[in-house]
Amino acid sequence: MKLQLVFLLLLFSLFNGCSGIMDTPQTKNFHFGDTVSVAFDQTVVNDDENIRLRFSKLISDGRCPLDLECFWEGNAEVEFEFSVNGTKSVFSLNTYSGYTRDTTISSYRINMIGLIPWPHSNELLFPGEYRAKITISNIEVIPVPPY
């Protein structure tokens, strides 16, 4: 009986401690060129252009913990789903500048600015705690009228 009570208290504590994660809205609007924070499993949308970007998966987080000294900063890789007018593309971006940090799909450039929180050696981070910082730009070439 005592073991069941302890288990229920731990379970309640876990869900109570994660309540801030669950409160993140699943979709939010963005404007081109702004730095946008996208939570894990959240979708950002631009209704004017009918585009959507979703932080679908944390592939890895091998960044050097803040409280350790490492010979390189490490890397985190995030998978995104991007759709333009319903056509979906899946790709991944990285935090380390030596790896792919941006991509272009149709006339849209998606750039990974960073990933928070930064890991600590004594903490286990769950995917729902992560936020990808990104920018999305419309790079469509605007024709210049002839002189």
Image (cartoon, grey):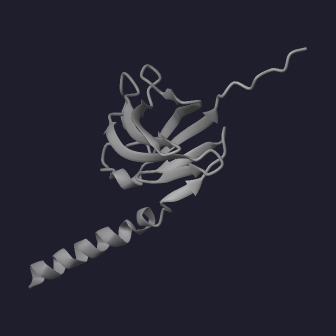
Q: Is residue 20 left or right of residue 122?
A: right
- Quadrant position of residue 69: top left
- Quadrant position of residue 136: top right
Q: Which residue of the protein is positioned furthest toward the front in this rendering?
A: 146
Residue visible at 45% across and 47% down in the picture: 54
Vertical arrangement, residue 19 with respect to residue 9, above or below: above
The answer to which of 58 and 7 lies nearer the viewer is 58
Residue visible at 91% across and 14% down in the picture: 147
Give the number of callouts. 0
Vertical arrangement, residue 109 with respect to residue 15, above or below: above
- Quadrant position of residue 144: top right
Residue 33 on image: x %, y %: 66, 38
Q: Is residue 20 visible?
A: yes
The answer to which of 81 and 127 lies nearer the viewer is 81
Q: Which residue of the protein is positioned furthest toward the top in this rendering?
A: 147
Residue 145 on image: x %, y %: 84, 20
Q: Is residue 122 left or right of residue 67?
A: left
Residue visible at 20% across and 78% down in the picture: 8
Q: Which residue of the protein is positioned furthest toward the right in this rendering?
A: 147
Q: Is residue 120 visible?
A: no
The answer to which of 107 and 22 lies nearer the viewer is 107
Q: Is residue 22 left or right of residue 147?
A: left
The answer to which of 42 and 51 lies nearer the viewer is 51
Residue visible at 62% across and 51% down in the picture: 47
Vertical arrangement, residue 58 with respect to residue 71, above or below: below
Residue 73 on image: x %, y %: 41, 27
- The quarter of the image holding the N terminus is bottom left
